[in-house]
Image (cartoon, rainbow, N blue to C red):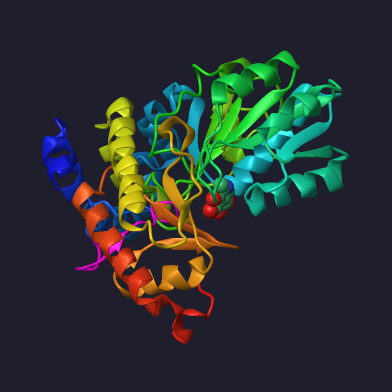
Amino acid sequence: MHLDAQDPGQIFWTHMGKSFDSGTPGTLYFDANSIGPMPCTVPLKMTTVLQEGWAQARRRSWNELDWLEQPRTLGASIAHLIGADSKDVRVTDTTSINQYKLLRYALSVAAPRHVIVLERHVFPSNRYVAEAIARDHQAQLRFIDDASQLPAALAPQDVAVVALSHVDYRSSTRLDMTELNRYIREAGAMSLWDLSHSAGAVAIALRQSDADLAVGCGYKYLCGGPGAPALLYIHPRWADAAWPAIAGWMGHADTFAFDADYRPGAGADRFLVGTPAVLANAAFSAAAQLWREVDPVALNQRHRSLTDTLIQLFDEQCAPWPVHLSSPRHHAQRGGHVTLQFHGAAALAQALVEQGVVVSSRKPDALRWGVHPLTTTHQQLWSAVQVLRQLLASGTWQDARFERPVV
Ligand SMILES: Cc1ncc(COP(=O)(O)O)c(C=O)c1O
């Protein structure tokens, strides 16, 4: 499509696109909001870590290879994407576990404040983690339906931490981090952002917006691979403020001193717990190498161009059918994916997948198109929307075989 050719950064985007495996021939992927594309160098990285590391160097790998450093080096390679300093970011554990660690940390720092504010319809795992903390540690949960209720929730001046999704996993609505962080800080509380649906897709300014804490999935737009470790960020003003909730040897100030007593490591290091997931980190390191080359401003522009085009195509090509945009129209208010509202989204998603257009659905009626700015082209968007149009026109998505539920 001519929009690809018109982009002044086209040479760079073509190079990036070629740095990723294109997947099954004839398939168009719009599921970077679940699992991002695989960098071509992953198989080599994995073979190297298995052969040179595990099979040959074995225990000596801890000294001879970079295994112990990876939570730091991986964090450093993505820090610019989230507007953070390298020293404040680690890649480790899962998003849910990091959410737990940082909620507990915020409760320690902010004591005797004991209230966690969170969105009622947040990604379920985030809610479950907070519920379990509330049961065990007498933290109290206060739910808000949306960010407009935040000032009222903060009013009693008892809030320790506000946990927010930067981008909603269903509608892709993106919150204004700068404005909300200001309210939160003025009320004496801390912010904890989940960047799962924005990191690697759109520009994020954690430090500039004065965010306190953040987590985010490594396996979505960041392309760390299935089950990849997650990111964790802490503002340096809190770096040495309390013990971590899970004190493990990798988070000790001097791991190999084997001290009897725990001493927290400096800053973000204290959130490392056990042995790094070396194989998963090896896969992530392929994407990390690519991310070092990416300018977040250019990435953001590329994502805007792609998703604006996708919305325009939906408007133009799908007007006769009851498909409605449920994501915001303005890019600054949107995250990585674009969501259509459609009664029958689950069946339509399966029909699209059968036709080689990989999208996902969420109950009750969300059809999600996860657009990866490093691999998606405008041409692919055009082709995919033609398939959508044909399915809507023919009505074949209503076939009984599309009724069984899939993930
Ligand atoms: C917004 C959000 N937060 C958290 C998670 C859970 O992440 P993890 O499986 O790494 O704990 C997900 C998973 O899809 C998510 O979408």
Residue 257 lies in what quarter of the image?
top right
Q: From what the image shows, is residue 295 above or below residue 23?
A: above
64 and 384: which one is in front? 384
180 and 109: which one is in front? 180
Q: What residue appears at the point 77 percent right and 30 percent down from the top-left corner?
A: 107
380 and 50: which one is in front? 380
Overall secondary structure of the magenta section: loop
Q: From what the image shows, is residue 205 above or below residue 136?
A: above
Query: Is residue 36 something that shows in the picture?
Result: yes
Q: Position of residue 58 (x, y in %)?
A: 37, 54
Magenta part of the protein: which range?
A: 23-35
Q: Position of residue 221 (x, y in %)?
A: 39, 46
Q: What residue appears at the point 74 percent right and 44 percent down from the top-left corner?
A: 130
Q: Is residue 31 magenta?
A: yes
160 and 342: which one is in front? 342
Q: Position of residue 333 (x, y in %)?
A: 48, 33
Q: What residue appears at the point 73 percent right and 22 percent down from the top-left corner?
A: 189
